Amino acid sequence: MRSLRALSLDLDDTLWPIEPAIAAAEATLHDWLLARLPAVAAAWPPPAMRELRARIARHCPEIAHDFSAQRRLSLAHALRACGSDEAQAEPAFEVFFCARNRVALYEDALPALTRLSALLPLASLSNGNADLARIGIDAHFAVQVSAREAGVAKPDARIFSALCQRLHCAPAQVLHVGDDPLLDVAGARDAGLQAAWLNRAGGDWPGPGAAPALVFRDLGELADWCAARLGAD
Ligand SMILES: [Mg+2]
């Protein structure tokens, strides 16, 4: 059996559902703009702001891995287009970012983090820009790696290499778990890590490649598996 020395977890849609948090953050930002910069709010309602961010991401590949930079640039562009003070981009970003981190953890997440972090070093590995300290769960993680800091995003093997270096582990000693078949499972597998799919919806494996040997319905199942594997709980 392969040795297991550390566990890496994806964040968005693994520890919490991301779409409701983003939608709420967009609405919060819109309310803030309505109160302070109504012309900007009228010109850039949430769907337009979302499309603008996507357009900026396509046109600026150098920040494809950095959602915070994309949001800041979007806000600066929206303000400039309305003749408003671009300096408002930073407080506007802070309003969005604060709301984006008000996530609702899946029910199984916190009990599993408590059990898992007592068993072995935990790492977070995310393409998103969540702030674990703001969310209040950073104490469970020995290491945090984001695409923003690493300069590349999953499934690029380099971000998995950076993770293993931070953990002082060989890739084969690390199990990465996440919801995304390509970004998490295929990415980790191609970089030489052990990989597990978090399949909350219970769907069929869509690829790429063969289904992983390890599939969990929730993080409680993952904690059970790790406890049995490591002979403790
Ligand atoms: Mg995810």
Image (spheres, rainbow, N blue to C red):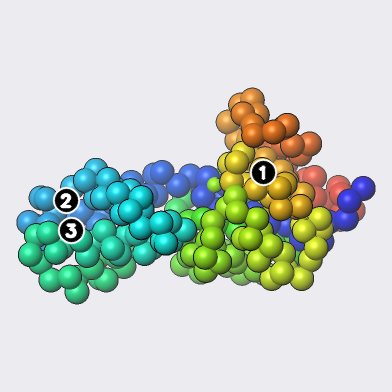
Q: Is mark 3 within 8 Å of ligand 1?
A: no
Residue carrying label 2 = 44
Residue carrying label 1 = 185
Closer to the camera, 161 or 177?
A: 161
Depicted 17 relative to depicted 110: above or below? above
* Disc 3 packing (10 Å; few <14; some 14–19; many ≥20): many
* Residue 145 coordinates in the image, percent (x, y): 59, 65
Q: Residue furthest top?
A: 204
Separation (CA) of disc 2 from disc 1: 37 Å
What residue is drawn where x is 47% and y is 50%?
104
Q: Amino acid at mark 3?
A: Ala
Closer to the camera, 80 or 3?
A: 80
Q: Amino acid at mark 2?
A: Trp
Depicted 167 relative to depicted 201: above or below? below
Marks 2 and 3 in Cβ contact (< 8 Å): yes
Residue carrying label 3 = 78
Label 3 secondary element: helix
Res 33 seen here? no
* Residue 59 coordinates in the image, percent (x, y): 33, 53
Separation (CA) of disc 2 from disc 3: 7 Å
Numbered marks: total: 3
Q: Earlier in the sequence, mark 2 or mark 3?
A: 2
Label 2 secondary element: loop
Label 1 secondary element: helix
Res 70 seen here? yes
* Quarter location, residue 180: top right
Q: Residue furthest bottom?
A: 87
